[in-house]
Amino acid sequence: MPRSIKSNRLATRTSRLTLPISKKPIYEKIGVGVSLGYRRNKTAGSWVLRIADGKGSSHIQSIALADDCAETNDSTILTFWQAQEAARARVKPGPIGSAPTPIQRPVTVADALDAYESDLQARDGDPSNVARARLHTKDLLRKPIVALNAKDLSCWRNTLAKTLAKATVNRIATCLRASLNLAMAHDERIVTDRSWKQGLKAFDNADRANNVTVDESTIRAIIAAAYDDSPEFGLLIEVAAITGSRYSQLVRVQVRDLAGDRLMVPVSRKGRGVKTTTHTPVPIPAQLGERLGAMSASRALSSPLLLTAAGAPWGRSADIARPFALAARAAGQDSSITMYCLRHTNIVRLIKANVPIRIIAAVHDTSVRMIERNYSEKIAHSSDDMIRNAMLDTSNM
């Protein structure tokens, strides 16, 4: 590879700052199949490396910022001459006559999501959010993480918000941020998280509670309509209505988790860290426990307690969205309500019965803070009734 080359356009900051601002870098060839590029930005420009693959395409990776606005620090801010050396250090020669190759391919967004999914699975977390993130990041997947910038990520987030609820966009962005943070922790070439900290900021007030609840007669009508669909679907909906557990938890309940009039419901995969408790005991009516016991008596203890009409485990929550909508419509409700209304209604029922918030949170595998945040109005109404019952009566004075 030749010695350092000269460039009237890129050698000095004065000449570089006369160039037009553009996302497309200006390249100078510094070796066979290797070019050093300069991208002119509104603030400091950046150096990029381009390596031809010998097949008509090329491999591009970011090197560092240019010393347009600050003096070089020999690492993240480089002069034109230092950028050449850094570019060469990232390239290894191939066989004679072949194109050079990068020492290590930069980590892309797709790589980060794959690694995060594997990490979740290793920690017994829920990888479903990663699949949702992949679906909505198709334009970003092949982009190296070091090439991400806050403006592009912010535009991506805002574009999603045109077709998705802001709460949904926040959840997708949270998953993407977690993936990028994990990649940064494992790759020393990724030196800053500023682009996604700024570009993927959560929308404010997007997670306001929209907890749809229905009355007891409607719950019974929905359960009856579910049984009309199939006994297995009816049983699933009945258990969900009585326990208030999430669908993702109920489908993981095993035969061994039934203990008479109690279900040991697996904890959710929500939240951070490793949960020390694996199951939550949830009371159920004795007659329901007897039916579940009789139905599962011949099955292995490790098999799912609740099965489909075909005898298979229940699948994704999306698979039951339409059957539940039909059951809701048969019960005289808007078919847009989801199975989650059973959980909300169960929590509100217990609040009105003056069950302590700590117990309600424990049984529903959530926190006191989340109950108080999402059901504050119901708690206030319940507290009002309790205070009135204990209020000093001065009417006979």
Image (cartoon, grey):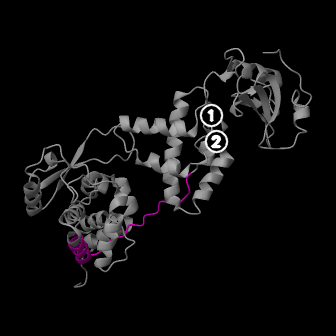
Task: State whether residue 117 appears in this view.
Answer: yes
Say which residue appears at 61% left-offset and 48% top-offset.
139
Give the magenta-colored segment's residue range. Answer: 202-226
- Three-letter amino acid code of the residue under disc 2: Ser
Q: Does the magenta stretch include residue 310?
A: no
Report crowding for label 2: few under 14, some 14 to 19, many 20 or more residues within 10 A (C-alpha): some
- Marking on residue 192: 1
Residue 358: give x, y in percent of width and height: 27, 54
CB of mark 1 within 8 Å of CB of mark 2? yes
Q: Where, by quadrant of the figure, is residue 230 drawn?
A: bottom left
Instruction: Please give left or right for residue 260 compared with residue 383 in the image.
Output: left
Say which residue appears at 22% left-offset and 70% top-offset.
223
- Marking on residue 195: 2
The answer to whether 241 is drawn above or below residue 112 in the figure is: below
Residue nearest the observer in this picture, 384 or 194: 194
Instruction: Please give left or right for residue 347 compared with residue 150 in the image.
Output: left
Quadrant in which the C terminus is drawn: bottom left
Say which residue appears at 33% left-offset and 52% top-offset.
367
